[in-house]
Image (cartoon, helix red, strand yellow):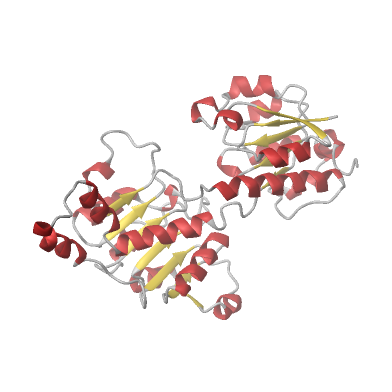
Amino acid sequence: MLKVLCTAEFDDMWEEKMKEYCDIRRVGFSLTKQPKDRLNEEQLIEALKGVDVFIVGYEKVTENVLYHAPDVKLLLSVRDGPEENIDIKACTKLGIPVLFSAGRCGRSVPEFTFLLIMALAKPLIKVVEEVRAGNWIKENDLKFRRINENSTEVYGKTLGIVGLGRNGLGLAVRAQAFGMRIIGFDPFVDREKMKAMDIEVYDLDAVMRQSDYIVLLARVTEENKGMIGEKEIGLMKPTACLVNTGRAALLDMDALFQALKEERIRGAALDVLDEEPPREDHPIYQIDPDRLIVTPHTAGVSVERITFQSRVLNEHLQNYLKGILPQSFCNREVIELPQFKERGKKLFGVN
């Protein structure tokens, strides 16, 4: 029977369905949900002995791991961006296809991103803290009124989205429901399609200048690392806010922190940092908390995400065994290489 190793969060119902046609074994983080139980390189090499298919969570899958796991013929990543922890070039070099769970965060990331926008628009965190501290008393009416003097509406405001992919468009639809004007920057989008969705596409500088809220949701490439730097932040309105729920590498953190300290922009919300978790003396702790919201890389987290990724990867595996290639194929070029015959092809179309 096909042997499968899973180190990712996985839905129990879909695990039972997979047991009907393969021997699936869950280890480490998959069982405990504790980051400390993610396998290191040595543990991973040992666990992959005799394994045909590896359902990858967050472990680093390096060329060394793949070289010392000659039985592995297929990788299934629960992530929408498997390149974050899998050496895709090494997989291709060794003839191993990498399939992934596209869209698993397609609802949770847009929802969480809009939550951050609203938390910047309204002093939600501040007033909740005051109430919990026992300060909601008659004598403090004026204090609460002053806190709420900074509360703004998002209706009629301009939302600029950098990266109009699945998550970017998901955010656009939600923001439009609140009456926001949507503009965006993405050199790869179909402008006619965007026009039909009532999304105006501009160059990056124009988006930075016009937006009341700027959200970063682009994928990271070598070309766009640090794309939002001192120059781009300098184009923002003094009343504008920046939100990053995409990738930390898109943003020059030092430039953002300096702009916040000097009050050149109104605020920011970050779900991703250049250092996670942040060290004790990280600059985020030196910024006025009324200007900066930081969350611990949780925008994509939801109960429904686990069910989604489990179902999708089960479908990918069944289709692959039938000789059907999914769209969510990270290194499609591998099937044209001779080394594919030695690894991935041994499972392709066997059913």
**Residue 295 point in image, percent of width and height:** 38, 47
For residue 310, which quarter of the picture? top right
Q: For this view, does 102 lie left or right of residue 346?
A: left
Q: Quadrant of the C terminus?
A: top right
Residue 288 in view of the camera: no
Tally the numbered discs. 0
Residue at the limit of the structure toward the right, as seen here: 351
From this view, report whether residue 174 is shown above or below residue 257: below
Q: Nearer the viewer, residue 249 or 347?
A: 347
Q: For this view, does 341 lie left or right of residue 72?
A: right
Q: For this view, does 99 lie left or right of residue 244?
A: right
Q: Nearer the viewer, residue 277 or 113?
A: 113
Residue at the limit of the structure toward the left, as seen here: 139
Residue 46 in view of the camera: yes
Residue that appears at 86% across and 36% down: 346
From this view, report whether residue 44 is shown above or below residue 329: above
Residue that appears at 56% across and 62% down: 165
**Residue 200 point in image, percent of width and height:** 48, 77
Residue that appears at 76% across and 48% down: 315
Residue that appears at 82% across and 36% down: 20
**Residue 190 point in image, percent of width and height:** 60, 73
**Residue 246 point in image, percent of width and height:** 47, 53
From this view, report whether residue 56 is shown above or below residue 227: above
